[in-house]
Image (cartoon, rainbow, N blue to C red):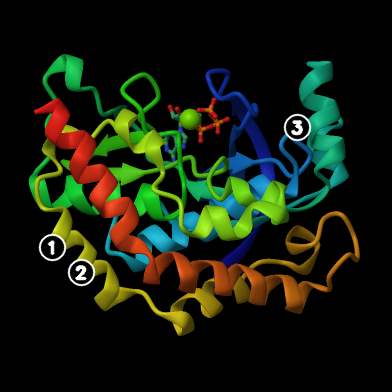
Amino acid sequence: MLRTVRATRYVTPLREGGSLPAIIEADDLGMYVLKFRGAGQGPLALLAELVAGEMGRALGLRVPELVFVEVEAALGRNEPDAEIRDLLKRSVGLNLALDYLPGSTMFDPAAGDTADAKLASLAVWFDAFVANVDRTPRNPNLLKWHGDLYFIDHGAALYFHHNWQSIDTAAHSQFSAIRNHVMLPWASALDAADAEAHQQLNTAVFAQILDAVPDAWVTPEGGVADATERRAAYVRYFDERLAASSSFVEEAKRVRAELV
Ligand SMILES: Nc1ncnc2c1ncn2[C@@H]1O[C@H](COP(=O)(O)OP(=O)(O)OP(=O)(O)O)[C@@H](O)[C@H]1O
Ligand SMILES: [Mg+2]
């Protein structure tokens, strides 16, 4: 499902990103924003970036193309910055990247940016579904590019996977953090978004997305459950969360009513 490219040039770090992502060039001459496997948040952040990103795409949201990126030891050898050199060394092998959108700017309501009800509602639904807390006015992770909005930075979504004991609670969570969602003010069509999401998502879609994740990212702790079993556990989580969507939809409607 995802293409694999090879990194050929480290162009520049994106210092505003907490995980020190970088713009790189690849052997297809494309430019990408690389999320390193060796960054502090580890392989589960890459899994979240991939799974949530593809989930957004399946819902009809714009997400820059995601690709696997092969990083070789040679890439970091001449890097003068020790922090970057170490990060590259820890990330030799498979990583994840997003197509780089040159000249894009961040969505900013304070500067007058607005969103239409359909898109905003689907975005709110999506972020509640994957439990993504990184879509706030301070950190919207929403890029304006050629007149469209692109959703990025899903590495912190699916936080339940850091603690599988919490999975049942997470699947049925109202996701109260939705009150801080940057698009909530425009999300006046949440019931329609819920209906649309139920049209687009199902077990087969979830399974196909999980199948794309490399084994080593699915069970980075090595072993506990094997990768196949763990993938099935993610799929069950999404099935349950979809079936329980009315709980987070009602919560989003409730907090929005207090807002507008
Ligand atoms: N595909 C892209 N095209 C252009 N710019 C991008 C792209 N992806 C990320 N950026 C820029 O790089 C910044 C950091 O990326 P991102 O938010 O994904 O990294 P992060 O380390 O997860 O950041 P955070 O500190 O928000 O957790 C973004 O805020 C954005 O300005
Ligand atoms: Mg970010």
Considering depth in this image, is 121 or 177 the residue closer to the camera? 177
Q: CA distance from mark 1 to mark 3?
A: 38 Å
Q: Which amino acid type is shown beneath numbered disc 3?
A: Gly
Q: Does residue 95 appear in the picture of this structure?
A: no
**In x, y percent, where is residue 240?**
47, 70
Mark 2 closeness class: few <14, some 14–19, many ≥20 residues within 10 Å: some
**Residue 175: x and y, percent?**
41, 44
Q: Secondary structure at mark 3?
A: loop
Q: Give above or below for 4 relative to 91.
A: below
Of tags 2 and 3, the one toward the viewer is 2
Task: Name the residue tied to disc 1.
Answer: 192
Closest to the observer: 247 or 17? Answer: 247
Along the line of sight, the residue nearer the viewer: 141 or 173 = 173
The label number, if any, that marks residue 171 in the structure image? none
Q: Observer-nearest residue: 148 or 61?
A: 61
Q: Which residue is mark 3?
A: 40
Question: Gap between marks 2 and 3, in whole Å?
Answer: 36 Å
Residue lying at 64% horizontally and 29% vertically, measured from the top left: 19
User: What amino acid type is highlighted by mark number 1?
Assistant: Ala
Mark 1 near mark 2, Cβ–Cβ under 8 Å? yes
Q: Decide: is 161 above or below 25.
A: below
> What secondary structure is marked by label 1?
helix
With 246 as the anchor, is 129 left or right in this view? Answer: right
Q: CA distance from mark 1 to mark 2?
A: 6 Å
At 85% across and 28% down in the image, what residue appears?
86
Of the two numbered discs 2 and 3 on the same chain, state the one appearing first in sequence. Answer: 3
Q: Position of residue 65 (x, y in %)?
A: 44, 57
